[in-house]
Amino acid sequence: MAAADLGGRQATAALTSPYAIELKGISKAFGSVQANKDINIAIPRGTIHGIIGENGAGKSTLMSILYGFYRADSGQILVNGAPVTIPDSQSAIRAGIGMVFQHFKLVQNFTVLENVILGAEDGPMLNSSLAKARKILGDLSREYELDVDPDALIENLSVGHQQRVEILKALYRQAEILILDEPTGVLTPDEADHLFRILRGLRDQGKTIVLITHKLREIMETTDNVSVMRRGTMVATVKTTETSPEALAELMVGRKVLLEVVKNPAKSGEIILSVKDLAVKDEHGVTRLKGVSFDIRAGEILGIAGVAGNGQSELLEALGGIAPASGVVVLNGAELPLTGPRANGKARRDAGIAHVPEDRQSLGLIMDFAAWENVAFGYHDDPRYQKNAWLMDNDALRADTAAKMATYDVRPPIPTLAAKSFSGGNQQKLVVAREMDRNPDLLLIGQPTRGVDIGAIEFIHKQIIALRDAGKAVLLVSVELDEIMSLSDRVLVMFDGQIMGERLPAQTNERELGMMMAGMGAK
Amino acid sequence: MDFATFLQISDTALRFATPLLLACLAGLFSERAGIFDIGLEGKMLMAAMSAGAVAAVTGSVWLGLIAAIFGSLLFAAVHGIASITFRGNQLIAGVALNFVASGITVLIAESMFGQGGRTPPLEGAARFANIDLPFTETLATIPVLGPFYAEVLSGHTILVYVALALVPISWWVLYRTRFGLRLRAVGENPASVDTAGVSVVRLRFSAVIIAGVLCGLAGAYMSTGLQAGFGREMTAGRGYIALAALIFAKWRPWAALWATLLFGFLQALALRPDVVESMTRVAIPVPFLDALPYILTVIVLAGFVGKAIPPRAGGEPYVKER
């Protein structure tokens, strides 16, 4: 009943309103935090509309309100000119809104078909629903380049294909408005290009696309209009053709931001780390890292590019002493034990390796512990922090953390605050502060700016370059090609646990690296 | 072991397997929806006492059955409210219910009947009667299958046949209906169900209620079918054995049937030490035979039967994330 009602309303309103979605005065507070403050935005039908902003700017909250996860404290939502209330996801779907989340909402051991019909079945029996969905899926695949095997299990699909399933789910529910939250974070450049082709195809069919991202390049290449959010408010909505990445970055952060990394040519010295035939098996006995060899010199940043899950994590864990490995690793002329009791994180630290792990929330920090406790990790035995033979000098640790917070611009600078209370960027600064303070010979750093604000990215990049200019070696693992290209002095591309080849950033481009990341291209 | 003895033991095995099967299917529905149910034991015990008491008072086994389902549902509701509504720890809630059941069943039985926590012996219409299946005479001439039909399959109470019928029904519900699809999805990734606009809470409550009804049947069978009356701790860990069988069966209905039959067979074997002795030519102590199902449980739970992957969202309360 309600669906038919709404459909009718949409049809008549469609004639009067050129906007697919209008938000008027949307506000939402969580306790004392104002996540959205008087948001006004009108998104014209048949356009790709970008929404950009730092972490915590309120993008996700706004989209959650649109998809019925939260209710706004005040304000009005209009879909095709008609006011709607969206108390739950069912209502959002009925209003023609589809959402592709950053973390896919798929059932791993269901087929594509089962995932698509879940919640949108025709009746209590599955057979007819499945048959109907199979036919519609075939049509949609042809129309929008959304090829995916309807009988494949999700767990056997690549991330790019899983994302297509999410889009198909929305289209199957006849979504006219498609919201995508950070859709390219896990895609190769090629997959991302394919996605944008799909999105343009959908727009040309009259659908409205809302693209939430922090990647300025995607905004510039793909969108028709872009809205910028900062600290819960909508600070600007502009035509994409009339703006620039620099202008957008300034709107996001509220001050001028250096997008280009400035660095002097590398003055590389002796070999600090030499890796030969390093291989790692996971707990199931599957070889994840299949014998990689490379050297890193002093005063050099070696970038490892690759799609997540191609052995980069294992490489970091093996070098950081977390995972047992085979092969030969020589640091400053001394061979490191790769298995046994002496292959551990502490031994590696003592040998001069610092490690900023890829996943700071599970490996880098204990989220419920205070900042000073987190910063103290690895320094417990340090004579500086011993009060006497039995007790640690917690006051000294807290004072030391406060000093580090000042140096590394951690906000708020409160050592007793729990790690989870900091934003992603400030959590990362805590880890970076702890690791760089060792003055290591070799820094292992994984995904240094994942989930980190533009302002903090700039800061962390500067720190990495400062370390390199101080004559230290850096191994940088990142899935962000921009980051690899701008920071690295040399780039290795990994695919399926192997190194596909080495390139100099000045003599390659994203397309070539993208091909190598997908397993194509010669050594 | 001759064929006749084998048939006798199989017949007993089927009786013993029935409460295990019902409880196992109860656990299957609950856990497939993402609610770990360690409280199968408590629900069965509660149901067994309710059935025994009501059947003794009214003289009607059917009223006893209704009381059993009601008693079990009461516990299921508490488990659901604790673990779904209030997002409590499902295992702790289940363990607590088991403790409560262990005490309250004896307390109620004692205060009602004053027979040391037992319910009075049931007879006649207060117990489920055995049903003789048709055509036993006609089929008796067929070798092997004929006697098997007459000796093993025929002559059980209605609940045995209900339990057996529930195996294909459960399979059909889980894999061929919309409800089943959503139920399995909510145990694997509740966010997928939630974002599809379907209520996670409602689905999980339905699963917990189904588990309650099935445990009600299992408990009723204990006190009015298998035995004639309720006795203190009469379920004797069957809820836990059913959980082991569930893992053994990798959360699949047909495999649950075979797993519970295996456990039932071991329990039946413990009643015939003479047969075991004649086969092994070693006098195996009866307590060891009694312990066999539990030893198998430990082996299964320790993961010696291959990799059993539980539903991915099992045990985790669903919290909507931003």
Image: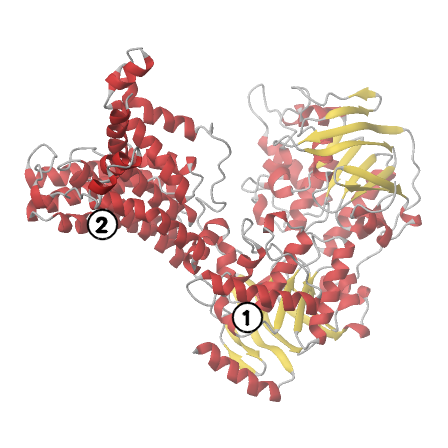
What is the CA distance from the residue labelled 1 to the residue labelled 2?
Answer: 49 Å
Residue A90 is situated, as x and y percent measured from the top left of the image, at 48, 68
Q: Are marks 1 and 2 on the same chain?
A: no
Residue A10 is situated, as x and y percent measured from the top left of the image, at 55, 82
How busy is the neighbourhood of tag 2: few (under 14 within 10 Å), some, or many (20 plus)?
many
The N terminus of chain A: image quadrant: bottom left
**Drawn side of residue B233 relative to residue A86, left or right:** left
Nearer to the camera, B272 or A62: B272
Does residue A31 appear in the picture of this structure?
Answer: no
Nearer to the camera, B261 or B132: B132
Amino acid, disc 2: Ile
Q: Residue at x 24, y 17 (%)?
A: B274
Question: Which residue in the structure is indicated by mark 1?
Answer: A27
**Drawn side of residue A78 relative to residue B209, left or right:** right
Q: Residue at x 84, y 28 (%)?
A: A274
Q: Residue at x 51, y 70 (%)?
A: A72
Question: Which residue in the structure is indicated by mark 2?
Answer: B69
| Label 1 SS | strand
B252 to A13, vertically: above or below: above
Amino acid, disc 1: Ser
How busy is the neighbourhood of tag 1: few (under 14 within 10 Å), some, or many (20 plus)?
many
Q: Residue furthest top?
A: B282
Does residue A380 appear in the picture of this structure?
Answer: yes
| Label 2 SS | helix
Nearer to the camera, A53 or B193: B193
Q: Which chain letter matches label 2? A: B
